[in-house]
Amino acid sequence: MGLQACLLGLFALILSGKCSYSPEPDQRRTLPPGWVSLGRADPEEELSLTFALRQQNVERLSELVQAVSDPSSPQYGKYLTLENVADLVRPSPLTLRTVQKWLLAAGARKCHSVITQDFLTCWLSIRQAELLLPGAEFHHYVGGPTETHVVRSPHPYQLPQALAPHVDFVGGLHRFPPTSSLRQRPEPQVTGTVGLHLGVTPSVIRKRYNLTSQDVGSGTSNNSQACAQFLEQYFHDSDLAQFMRLFGGNFAHQASVARVVGQQGRGRAGIEASLDVQYLMSAGANISTWVYSSPGRHEGQEPFLQWLMLLSNESALPHVHTVSYGDDEDSLSSAYIQRVNTELMKAAARGLTLLFASGDSGAGCWSVSGRHQFRPTFPASSPYVTTVGGTSFQEPFLITNEIVDYISGGGFSLNSSDYSCLPLSSTSASSWNADLHCSICRFLLFSVYSLSPGTNH
Ligand SMILES: *[C@@H]1O[C@H](CO)[C@@H](O)[C@H](O)[C@H]1NC(C)=O
Ligand SMILES: *[C@@H]1O[C@H](CO)[C@@H](O)[C@H](O)[C@H]1NC(C)=O
Ligand SMILES: *[C@@H]1O[C@H](CO)[C@@H](O)[C@H](O)[C@H]1NC(C)=O
Ligand SMILES: *[C@@H]1O[C@H](CO)[C@@H](O)[C@H](O)[C@H]1NC(C)=O
Ligand SMILES: *[C@@H]1O[C@H](CO)[C@@H](O)[C@H](O)[C@H]1NC(C)=O
């Protein structure tokens, strides 16, 4: 079929196999544990999808990230504004026009873009979405810690070939909202000391890092920080105030969050959400703090993608963000990983510091066709973020040297030879048992760690 027929197909929504392609053939589509299918969605139901439009000048962006981050570069510290970033990466007029025409022809409504114009979220009926994305078949699912309802497609979607130069991927079809990264650690092996450990209160952390009462935000600079939560977990203002009354006695602090972005629901306070806010505001004490809470217009969307879009839609943001979201690197399509990396570069070029939890699975062994492999967490494995692992005290009853917590991940990627454990594991992997294999990797992981109140935050 010729180009003309393909173009015709694009606008008339007539597609044949030859004229379409799979943007994310490698995206995992199996149901994550804890989710169940409720059957096929009603064709008249509405859903919202996210379209990642092809950006321009990504190479140049990558060079700029290096230049503003390298102390020996004359451009060191000369960060870009969001508007500068937009001028660089904004999709071409042809891309904007082509995608818009395609979506309008399919009946998409209420489309929203961001300042950088490289994302679009639109509403469609299930019927329209299934026509737009051949192969997709939408089903209802329920699961996660708060019994979230989502609509997802267990089958891969295709796009018209004519869109290949214009669309990176479509979000909201396959990836499920993350479940908690906070794992219950196994019972300690040693009997007799069970349940006895040093309470890692804010003053313990401040003491360990030599923070004096002067080491707090002075209010004269624009210091700001944020944490993001995607688990539909909420913190409560009253809990935070109570926490600060109990534990914030010996350092100046703020007892409330400056801004909540997204929906701070009325549900019960979550341990993870509360911990994030309370410890962020005690280590970074007296500093204006924002919380991104289950951001997005609709609970069924991909929350991490929603958060990335918020970063591209606001010029003035906190400078430091801590995020405890992570997915198994192998579960994500390379189109998605590459695009998220570009989003993280956009943030780096603006001088934003993004801290990601390294995960609680150590090197994360799993079996691929009978062979054991390591299992990194993304975006902790991205080169454009700072990955933070967990530590604990060598002597649990004193504020002593830290050791790497054994459950802590390392921030390595299997996809980058710089960080990879693969060359090691592939040498004589078949003769190694999985434990040895993983302890070697875990040993390597020991070289990367950072501060944390005992868990990976
Ligand atoms: C981006 O911000 C603008 C202005 O506040 C808003 O109208 C638009 O809906 C936002 N985009 C998204 C995707 O939320
Ligand atoms: C804290 O101060 C002690 C004593 O001066 C020093 O040995 C230690 O390295 C400092 N710790 C940090 C994290 O700076
Ligand atoms: C804490 O911040 C406030 C402004 O938010 C400032 O007025 C105050 O001086 C700060 N406290 C200390 C001890 O620096
Ligand atoms: C502080 O933040 C405000 C709002 O984001 C901004 O207008 C102002 O220029 C900032 N000031 C400094 C000193 O960075
Ligand atoms: C993984 O590495 C290969 C080879 O360097 C590269 O072509 C590919 O794009 C990478 N994939 C991702 C998701 O980064």
Image (cartoon, rainbow, N blue to C red):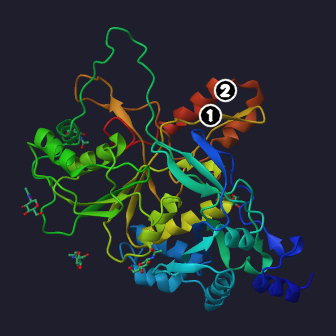
Which image quadrant: the N terminus?
Answer: bottom right
Q: Amino acid at mark 2?
A: Ala
Q: CA distance from mark 2 to mark 1?
A: 8 Å
For label 1, count other residues whose C-alpha is less than 10 Å away and answer few (under 14), some (14-19) or many (20+): some
Residue at the image point whose x is 77% and y is 82% from the top? 10
Q: Which of the 4 quarters of the picture holds residue 332?
A: bottom right
Q: Relative to residue 435, is residue 26 depicted above or below?
A: below
Ligand 5 within 8 Å of disc 2? The answer is no
Marking on residue 168: none
Determine which residue is flagged by label 2: 434
Is 325 displayed left or right of 9 in the figure?
left
The residue identified by callout 1 is 365
Does residue 452 show up? yes
Give SS at disc 1: loop
Q: Residue at x 57, y 28 (%)?
A: 439
Camera-side residue: 453 or 391?
A: 453
In the image, residue 400 lies at what x, y percent? Answer: 26, 29
| Position in image of residue 284 (x %, y %) | 23, 53
> Which residue is painted at 23% across and 30% down in the image?
399
Q: Amino acid at mark 1?
A: Cys
Dot placed on the residue nearer the N-terminal end, 2 or 1: 1
